[in-house]
């Protein structure tokens, strides 16, 4: 009996050790990918005050956690303040975020604004409220950033969000437009950053489980999920399953753009295009039947996701 107990204990210890190893590897990968995105796009600079918008969802919790880790290792100094907008949705657990942020010692601000009543009054019953809610929330957060003296506004959008937005704009808005890792706000007064730009949603889901974040559900308002985004998410998931590497290639393509091979005359001057007599690697190979190399031998792997 003792031998059986000892064997079971040894097995449990090995499992726990393996889980701890995998969790640590996940954390290191996330920190590296976020650090890479911050460096690639110069998202955070010395002396910045970064306002992390905290919704209570897995992504914003994870973003705050990773930024706190990176701040300890960074060669520059920057401050972090967490901000939550309490929109007075019925059932919103207003004590959860203050308790969590107090526990981990992060400065925070809770902004109380009853946008829920406004949205419910304006949007017909049964229609998605996300668009109006987002606009109201954005304006309030810009104001709060001014009041807090924040120089950067950090949002928890990840790689999947960026890809989904790209296809949403293309399929339903007839635009080649995505969700950039860094941009100027529409009021021209703020810099908005997305440090999770290189991170997969699946990794954020697992990280949230590991960290045991006190997740607040995002459906408290009773609004239906954006059905178009849901379709795009399913499409990308199906592609990833049937054609491994395709989604990674699409994501890489967002940062490898050839304006001369598209059709936007505002980005490339087709009207005044003349021959130069010099060979160009970006020149069109007009008579090729295949516009690109076979994908089987030309899959661009998203760096760092298969680390040991």
Image (cartoon, rainbow, N blue to C red):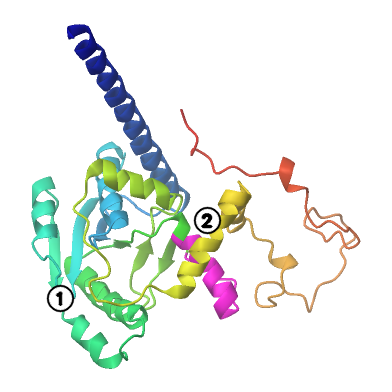
Task: Provide residue 48's location: percent of width, then percent of height.
Answer: 27, 55
**Which residue is found at the position 36% from the left and 65% from the top?**
191
Q: Which picture quadrant has residue 269?
A: bottom right
**Image-based side of 288 in relation to 304, left or right:** right
Does residue 248 appear anywhere in the picture? no
**Image-based side of 54 in relation to 305, left or right:** left
**Which residue is found at the position 36% from the left and 85% from the top?**
127
Name the residue carrying label 1: 90
The mark tally for this picture is 2
Q: Nearer the viewer, residue 239 or 47?
A: 239
User: Dot 1 lies on which element?
Assistant: loop
**Which residue is found at the position 29% from the left and 50% from the top?**
62
Q: Residue furthest front?
A: 1
Q: Residue furthest top?
A: 3
Q: Which picture quadrant has residue 149?
A: bottom left
Task: Provide residue 143's location: percent of width, then percent of height.
Answer: 23, 75
**Which residue is found at the position 32% from the left and 44% from the top?**
207
Q: Is residue 176 magenta?
A: yes
Task: Provide residue 69's location: percent of width, then percent of height.
Answer: 26, 41
Does residue 171 appear anywhere in the picture? yes
Which image quarter holds the N terminus? top left
Q: Does the magenta stretch include residue 300?
A: no
In the rendered image of this protein, does residue 89 appear above or below residue 34?
below
- Say the numbered circle drawn on residue 237: 2
Q: Give the range drawn in magenta.
A: 161-179
User: Dot 2 lies on which element?
Assistant: helix
**Image-based side of 300 in relation to 141, left or right:** right
**Image-based side of 295 in relation to 86, left or right:** right
In the rendered image of this protein, does residue 231 appear above or below residue 114?
above
In the rendered image of this protein, does residue 37 appear above or below residue 221?
above
């Amino acid at each position: 009996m003792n031998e059986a107990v000892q064997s079971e204990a040894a097995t449990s210890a090995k499992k726990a050790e393996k889980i701890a190893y995998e969790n640590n590897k996940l954390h290191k990968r996330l920190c590296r990918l976020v650090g890479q995105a911050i460096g690639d796009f110069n998202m955070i600079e010395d002396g910045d005050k970064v306002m992390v918008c905290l919704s209570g969802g897995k992504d914003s919790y994870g973003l705050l956690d990773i930024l706190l880790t990176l701040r300890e290792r960074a060669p520059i100094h920057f401050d972090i303040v967490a901000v939550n907008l309490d929109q007075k949705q019925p059932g919103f657990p207003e004590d959860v975020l203050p308790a969590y942020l107090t526990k981990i010692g992060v400065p925070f601000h809770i902004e109380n604004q009853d946008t829920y009543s406004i949205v419910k009054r304006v949007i017909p019953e049964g229609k998605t409220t996300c668009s109006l809610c987002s606009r109201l929330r954005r304006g309030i957060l810009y104001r709060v950033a001014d009041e807090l003296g924040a120089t950067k506004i950090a949002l928890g959008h990840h790689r999947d969000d960026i890809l989904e937005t790209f296809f949403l704009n293309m399929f339903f808005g007839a635009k080649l437009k995505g969700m950039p890792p860094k941009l100027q706000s529409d009021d021209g007064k703020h810099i908005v950053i997305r440090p999770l730009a290189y991170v997969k949603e699946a990794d954020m889901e697992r990280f949230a489980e590991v960290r045991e974040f006190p997740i607040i559900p995002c459906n408290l308002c009773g609004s239906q999920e954006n059905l178009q985004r849901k379709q795009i998410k399913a499409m990308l998931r199906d592609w990833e399953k049937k054609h491994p590497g395709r989604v990674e290639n699409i994501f890489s393509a967002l940062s490898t753009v050839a304006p001369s091979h598209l059709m936007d005359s505002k980005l490339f001057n087709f009207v005044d295009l003349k021959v130069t007599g010099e060979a160009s690697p970006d020149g069109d190979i007009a008579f090729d039947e295949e516009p690109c190399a076979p994908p089987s031998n030309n899959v661009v792997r998203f760096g760092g996701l298969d680390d040991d």
